[in-house]
Image: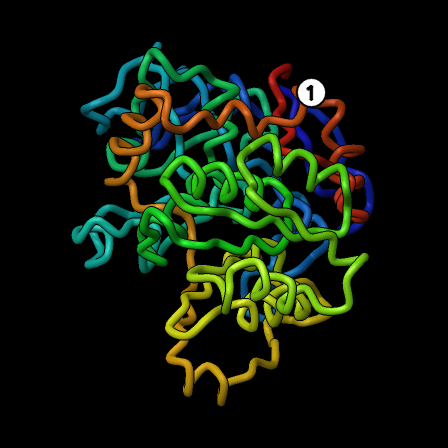
Amino acid sequence: MRAAVIEEHGEPLAITDVEYPEPEPDQVVVETKACGICRSDWHAWQGDWSWIGAGVPEGQILGHEPAGVVAAVGEDVETLAAGDRVAVPFHLGDGNCAHCREGRANNCETVLPLGLSEYAPGAFAEAFPVREADFNCVKLPDEVDFAEMAGLGCRFMTAYHALADRADLRPGDWVAVHGCGGVGLSAIHIARALGAHPIAIDVLDSKLERAEELGAVETINGADVDNAPREVKAITDGGADVSIDALGIAETCQNSVTSLGTRGSHVQVGLTTGEEAGQINLPVDVMTMQEIDFHGSFGMPLVRYEELFSLIAQGTLEPSKIIGETLSLEDAPETLAAMDDYETVGIPVITEF
């Protein structure tokens, strides 16, 4: 089968033939129908995350935002059958650790990130295996199509968890979103749908225009102002209630924290590059005196999918609006490379394999 593989970090992905997977007893093999191309794929391709012991090896098949159809079933799998339409969260849990048992599989003690671990080949391929399939596969409602689910796969569900769970977003809150890539645009749409007032901050007008289409009530071009946090505080009369760093560089993280008002909540969604290597200076005295909360947010617990699907069925959330373009597998190398300069708008999704 065909797959997009890292042959060398930073060099174009290779579209090559690899062996079709056979399921282990606990696994299913999923035929890929759609898969998003995410900035996390870009990080892996660049060779990032060695500073936390999570560097992705050369030879890896990327792709962690998939939806597809079960093609083969391991002998121990009980709840899935060939032909089932499924979504697969990128954080593959073991189903047995304390976090998984308590409904927080995104924090699994032995998590295997799909497409980002040599033990979990990804979905930039015609098919891919899923460990502990009874636990990790989510059956896809008929009203959610494959491309839409791929748009949900990492960035949208991460933004939902960040706002609804980690920040405890409330109607009427002001939300500053720093960085309007896929996860940032998702946060804009979700915040507005949940009754909040999102402010979009980016340096590209094309992304700010898309943010307005998705519900941003105000936009700030960081390249045109001296102090983006000051602009947020002027708009909100004192500071945002919630602020998200959706990019992961020092400037956006620091701006996010300093955009907040007293007792505001910062949520860190973006992961850092080699320049920061996971270390960013923060104004801790201000955070202490203003009782500012700092939250990390990684994926979304599996138990939250039902609520997310319900909101989509009601028309409250429309993840299809975040999709930027649909592509073929051959387009993956060029699309990933375009993320060097933050050129992609919305979530690009591979639909042809």
Residue 230 sits above or below residue 152 on the image: below
- Residue at 70 percent of width and 40 percent of height: 207
Q: Secondary structure at mark 1?
A: strand
Quarter occupied by the C terminus = top right
- Residue at 79 percent of width and 50 percent of height: 10
Answer yes or no: is residue 141 visible: yes
Percent of width and height locating residue 321: 55, 25
- Residue at 55 percent of width and 44 percent of height: 183
Q: Nearer the viewer, residue 281 or 331?
A: 281
- Name the residue beneath numbered marker 1: 327
Answer yes or no: is residue 121 visible: no
Quarter occupied by the N terminus = top right
Q: Using the rendered view, name the quadrant where residue 249 is placed.
A: bottom right
> Which class describes the residues within 10 Å of circle 1: few (<14), some (14-19), or many (20+)?
some
Percent of width and height locating residue 3: 65, 27
Q: Does 1 sit left or right of 286 as displayed? A: right
Percent of width and height locating residue 143: 36, 13
Residue 30 sits above or below residue 273 on the image: above
Q: Does 32 sit left or right of 264 as displayed? A: right
Q: Nearer the viewer, residue 279 or 85?
A: 279
Which amino acid type corresponds to the residue marked 1 in the rendered image?
A: Leu
Q: Nearer the viewer, residue 310 or 20?
A: 310
